């Protein structure tokens, strides 16, 4: 019969302790070193095929990169707040379905054409409308739409005498009062484009009627002439200015090598009695060999043509972009297509698509209060190698300034769609919207949404 074994640590009386010699110590140290190097070797062997030294940020983006890219080289919007893929349904109002909308597109007499409005720095209002009409995300059913696009070319129409300010204001109010879905959401899911420095102020009553709507504009500030800005960073979207199509395709001029550029910097624009611009003009008189600042004429026989303008722009290493009538300037975007590093001299300027672009790597922002010799000294101190790096970085992202079809993954169109996706809400309500236990929406008089008839009181 086997005796029960006593519980406790095993007894190894037959083993003898071996003394630890210097040879054992050296062997143990070599084993640790070998293990360390083998571990590092395997880490590198199975790492993703990307820049090994770049720090990985949220959503797999490289913090050291000029922009967020996915594994295939396309721009990658952060997953948080955007989702993994575009999934939008946008309804585009037809010009004939709402009384007054046609006047906002072609003037009171209907004589202004989209072709006459697509040119110039405000052409984005026409391009975005056309691109949304052709978009694969367009829906023709209002009831399934996430967002509603309200087309209007009011900047162009106003400039060409098609409508005056009072007519624009009155027509917008008339149009909005005929849109049940605008009233249902309080305008929160409706998109408006205002492509100039005036922003939404082109619609004088914007603060009353579309202060909750999504505004696409290049202008993030208008405090020089008004008490408040129409831009709200939490609901609106900054878009690029409309760069000449021939310039974006390099059909006008080709960039010059740095060694062939005549000037350190240039400013091509009118003074407009603006402090920053006047300082640059005086600075050019002091340092004519460094800073080109010609007196530009936009009328008459000495008018500067588009090709001559871009030939001047490409002849400097740095393109200065001071504030004008408003904070944004088209010159900032144009600089990328002549491969001139833009220097932003507009303190309140807002820039597009900041969730994917690191602007420190493609441009310089300098305090407008310090425009003077100090600015030229700083620019002169930057080595050509650094300038070349910034220019190369700019080549990667300038496609985001181009209003190409959404089939081009790197385009202003796709970038705007991603930003719009972030604005989509599952549920919409306003001060004039109520709902009942059966899931129906009603107005203040308990009339069901399907029976709302224009004109309606606006929220």
Image: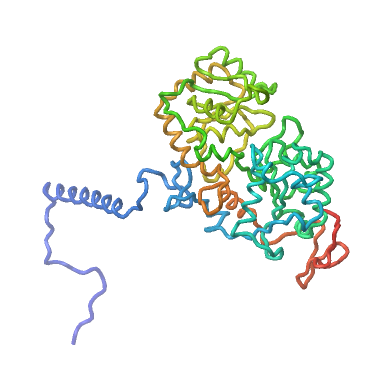
Given residues 351 and 267, the one toward you in this image is 267
Farthest residue, direction bottom: 1
Whether residue 196 sits left or right of residue 13 in the image: it is right
Whether residue 183 sits left or right of residue 195 in the image: it is right
Query: Is 215 rendered above or below residue 335?
Result: below
Residue depicted at 51% across the width and 35% down the height: 337
Q: Say whether residue 276 is visible.
A: no
Farthest residue, direction right: 445
Residue 189 percent across, percent down from the top left:
70, 55
Query: Is 178 rendered above or below residue 230?
Result: below
Q: How is the image coloured?
A: rainbow
Query: Residue 188's quadrant in the figure?
Result: bottom right
Residue 301 percent across, percent down from the top left:
65, 22
Given residues 122 and 309, the one toward you in this image is 309
Query: Residue 431's quadrant in the figure?
Result: bottom right
Identify the image quadrant of the N terminus. Answer: bottom left
Residue 424 percent across, percent down from the top left:
65, 57
Farthest residue, direction front: 301
Residue depicted at 82% across the width and 47% down the height: 171
């Amino acid at each position: 019969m086997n005796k029960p074994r006593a519980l406790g640590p095993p007894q190894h009386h037959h083993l003898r302790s071996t003394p630890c010699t210097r040879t054992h110590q050296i062997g143990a140290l070599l084993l640790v070193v070998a293990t360390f190097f083998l571990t590092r070797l395997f880490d590198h062997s199975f790492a993703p095929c990307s820049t090994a030294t770049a720090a990985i940020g949220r959503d797999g983006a490289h913090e050291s990169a000029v922009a967020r890219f996915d594994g295939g080289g396309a721009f990658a919007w952060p997953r948080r707040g955007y989702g993994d893929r575009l999934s939008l349904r946008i309804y585009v109002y037809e010009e004939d379905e709402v009384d007054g909308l046609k006047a906002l597109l072609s003037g009171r007499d209907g004589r202004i054409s989209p072709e006459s409005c697509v040119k110039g720095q405000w052409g984005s209002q026409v391009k975005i409308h056309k691109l949304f009409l052709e978009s694969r995300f367009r829906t023709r059913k209002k009831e399934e739409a996430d967002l509603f696009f309200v087309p209007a070319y009011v900047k162009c129409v106003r400039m060409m005498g098609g409508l005056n300010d009072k007519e624009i204001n009155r027509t917008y109010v008339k149009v909005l009062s005929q849109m049940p879905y605008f009233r249902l959401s309080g305008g929160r899911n409706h998109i408006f484009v205002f492509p100039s420095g005036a922003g939404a102020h082109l619609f004088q009553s914007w603060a009353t009627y579309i202060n909750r709507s999504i505004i696409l504009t290049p202008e993030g500030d208008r405090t020089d002439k008004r008490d408040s800005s129409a831009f709200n960073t939490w609901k609106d979207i900054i878009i690029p200015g409309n760069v000449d199509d021939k310039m974006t395709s390099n059909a006008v001029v080709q960039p010059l090598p740095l060694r062939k550029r005549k000037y350190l910097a240039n400013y091509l624009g009118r003074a407009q009695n603006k402090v920053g611009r006047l300082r640059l003009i005086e600075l050019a008189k002091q340092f004519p060999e460094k800073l080109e600042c010609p007196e530009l004429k936009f009328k008459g026989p000495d008018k500067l043509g588009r090709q001559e303008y871009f030939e001047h722009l490409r002849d400097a290493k740095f393109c200065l972009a001071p504030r004008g009538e408003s904070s944004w300037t088209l010159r900032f975007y144009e600089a990328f297509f002549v491969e001139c590093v833009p220097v932003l001299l507009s303190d309140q300027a807002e820039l597009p698509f900041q969730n994917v672009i690191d602007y420190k790597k493609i441009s310089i922002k300098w305090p407008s209060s310090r425009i003077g010799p100090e600015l030229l000294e700083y620019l002169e101190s930057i080595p050509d190698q650094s300038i070349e790096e910034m220019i190369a970085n700019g080549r990667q992202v300038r496609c985001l300034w181009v209003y190409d079809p959404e089939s081009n993954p790197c385009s202003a169109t796709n970038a705007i769609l991603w930003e719009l996706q972030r604005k989509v809400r599952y549920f919409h309500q306003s001060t004039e919207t109520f709902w009942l236990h059966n899931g129906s929406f009603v107005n203040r008089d308990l009339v069901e949404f399907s029976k709302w008839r224009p004109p309606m009181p606006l929220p």
